Amino acid sequence: MKLPKIDFEKYNYPLRTLLLGNSDTWQAMSAVIEDLTQKQFAYQYTQIKQRSIAQMLDHAMDTQYGFYTKKLVMGEDLPPNLYKKPVKTVREAQKRIAETFQKTVELWEKLTPEDFQKEIQTEWGQVLTGELALFQSITHTHYHVSEICFLRGLGGFPTTAMG
């Protein structure tokens, strides 16, 4: 799957760096799910309460777009989840990734230098700038990339997509 093309050279720091990192992360997410079956998307490890792979993917998209970008950085109300039901197919998952990635890029492009520099305090007391919040949204997504790799191994359908 290819994400929407971005001309990174037209952006300056910090947006350029954030877009580069975000592109890498969502390409990695796409790679670790690209060969999953419908049954594998629904896989949950039974020994602990945990999201399915499909639910993790939706959670990662909702968290970056809704929580970090719209709520924390833009100061808006937390929007509803982007999708009502978890994905079932690779094609559907990759379509959602591309759509959400594009929506997120469009929001990030509208941010001002003040948005990146402003101080934000989370509900749990963490203080960070807008730039750091967006960086955390990228690392949060990549955490779930790793979690999906781990779950695939536990489920008996490992991937070599991440090396």
Image (cartoon, rainbow, N blue to C red):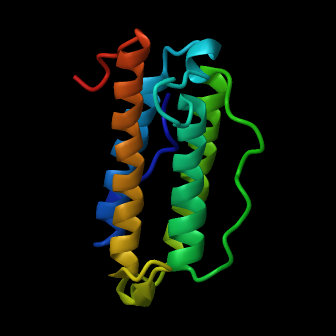
Which residue lies most toward the top here? 156
Which residue lies most toward the left here? 163
Q: Residue at x 41, y 25 (%)?
A: 151
For the question of whether residue 100 can be seen, the reply is yes
Q: Residue at x 41, y 19 (%)?
A: 152
144 over 124 or under it: above or below:
above
User: Foreground residue, 125 or 79?
Assistant: 125
112 over 31 or under it: above or below:
below
Residue 15 image point, x, y percent: 36, 69
**Image quadrant assignment for residue 77:** bottom right
Quadrant (top left/top right/bottom left/bottom right) for the C terminus = top left
Q: Is 55 left or right of 9, judged from the image as shown?
A: right
**Image quadrant assignment for residue 147:** top left
Residue 155 image point, x, y percent: 44, 14
30 over 124 or under it: above or below:
above
For the question of whether residue 107 can be seen, the reply is no
Q: Residue at x 52, y 77 (%)?
A: 72
Q: Residue at x 39, y 71 (%)?
A: 133
Q: Number of marks in the image? A: 0
Residue 50 image point, x, y percent: 52, 37
